[in-house]
Image: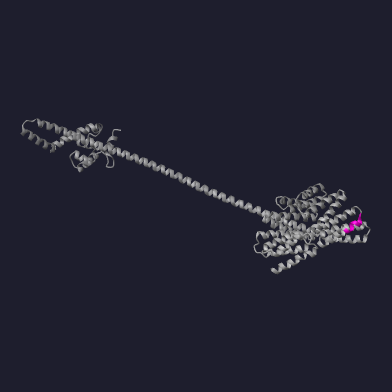
Amino acid sequence: MRATYVNLFVILLSLSSYSQYHDSIATSLKYKIERATSDSARMGYKIELVKQIHRFDLDTSRIIVNDILKQIEEIQGAAPYYQKNKAKALNYLGIIENKQGNAEKALTTYLKALDISETMNDSTTIGLGFHNLGMFYRRQQDYKKSKQYFKKAIAIKEKMTDVESLAVSHHMLAVTYYTNKQNDSSLIHILKVKALPCSKTRIAKANGSLAAIHYSNKEFDKAIGIYKENIIISKDIRDQSELSVSYLNVAVLYNALKEYDKAVPYLDSAITIAKEQKNKGLLLKQYYSKSNLNETRKEYEQALQDYKIYKMYNDSINDIEKAKRITALELNYTFDKEKQAAELILESETGKKRLYFILFATALILGGVIFWLTRKNAKHRIALAKNKLKQEQLEKVKAELALVTREKELQKVVVDSSIRQEIISKTLGEIKEIIRLENEQERKQALHSLSASLLSEKATKRTTTDLQSYLNKVRLDFKVILDTQFSMLNDKEKELLCLMTLGLNSTEISKLQSTTVSAIKSSRSRIRKKIGVSSKDDIIEFIMNAVK
């Protein structure tokens, strides 16, 4: 790799003798290339060097560009920096091919560079690519396309800080307008160039275009003065291409003024420089002018020889088959771009459809989930309402049971209290009677008799009678039903039924009636048979329903 750099540096050193001048910028860049410590820095300096020397040394520029492209190809997975330099190198290679008449290679190279630039979205190289395509189509005399590309280049470059590059595009658009005989439009862009703080080279080229406008207006003296000024500037800045053009223009003007002897040396100088540059475009114009000049001077043999050379360059540049191939290349490029655009649109539409389907499916799923949750929530609320209702009903039942229980307890207390009160009242009455007795023996005998009476069956019967009297008062309505509708029952059975209406159980009733529980149960069975009610039905309810 080191040997390659040394060989390249030797080639670069030969530029001084080849171009016969020592350019300070190029020399500085060559020094930087030699001293660079990294491939990336070295590559950047090479690009700048090509930018400086491609105007006057196409062959060396080609060598450097090919070396840059080879170096980039050897780098695996080249970073954006190298891709950007590749686009620049291809643009300069296209310029070299275009200047040397290789139109097909030039177009292919320009389009390849533009593809890389647009992929990277790099404004600098995109602007350079548009400008170079404008130059290409101008050379092919397709001025409509040429102006379109120059305008695209200007629109991009106006947003950047590279004034020199902007001036170049303005100038070449002015030249294209001039070629179409649109002098007013051409003058606008020439003045824009002269208003920019650009280099002497750019001013010289703008001056050349301004002189051309003076020439078309037949202001020959003004035009010659500007071209001669440009010759001085071109020599000062060592711009061989512009110098060749300036010599040619002065020769053409002297020819127009019929000062043929003055025109010849300027024309010869122009041809010499163009040959050194291998610039077929300039040589085409220069030999055509020389043929006309010699014909005017009546040097017909030399005029014919010059015309043959002109025809050779013309056929080389304007080959019809080549033009067809160029058109095919352009169409293929356009087709590829349109195909890529269509694929991107199709991919975008497919992506949109996929997204819409996903959104639709998601909406359906979410809708289903929301419906399920809503339904579940509604069911839960219904279940809660039912549970609440059941709870309320249960509480109501409990409250009713508590009321019934309390009522039974109160009824029992009332019955017990009433019975007890009756017994106490009678007992107290008897005790009072006993107290009134004056005879002690009689009192003792009376007390003994009272005690026996309380414990005797007679006292119990009397208490039962009192109970029956109480029941007749408390359940009078029920007693009436029994007496009127169920006369087949005896008093003891009717008493039992009245006690049952008070909610008393068999044990409690047995105590009140001074009998056993089994006796109570037997009485109930007899009552059921007498009134005709089954064991499954409630006796009291049956009796109460009898009057309805």
Q: Which residues are magenta?
A: 259-265
Query: Can you see residue 333?
Result: yes
Instruction: Say above or below: 404 vs 35.
Output: above
| Residue depicted at 52% across the width and 49% down the height | 365
| Residue depicted at 70% across the width and 57% down the height | 115
Queried whether the magenta region covers residue 292, the answer comes back as no
* Percent x, y of residue 148: 75, 51
* Percent x, y of residue 237: 79, 57
* Percent x, y of residue 514: 17, 39
Quadrant hosting residue 41: bottom right
Name the one closer to the observer, 181 or 392. Answer: 181
Query: Can you see residue 314?
Result: no
Quadrant hosting residue 538: top left
* Percent x, y of residue 351: 61, 52
Instruction: Say above or below: 520 vs 209.
Output: above
Queried whether the magenta region covers residue 262, the answer comes back as yes
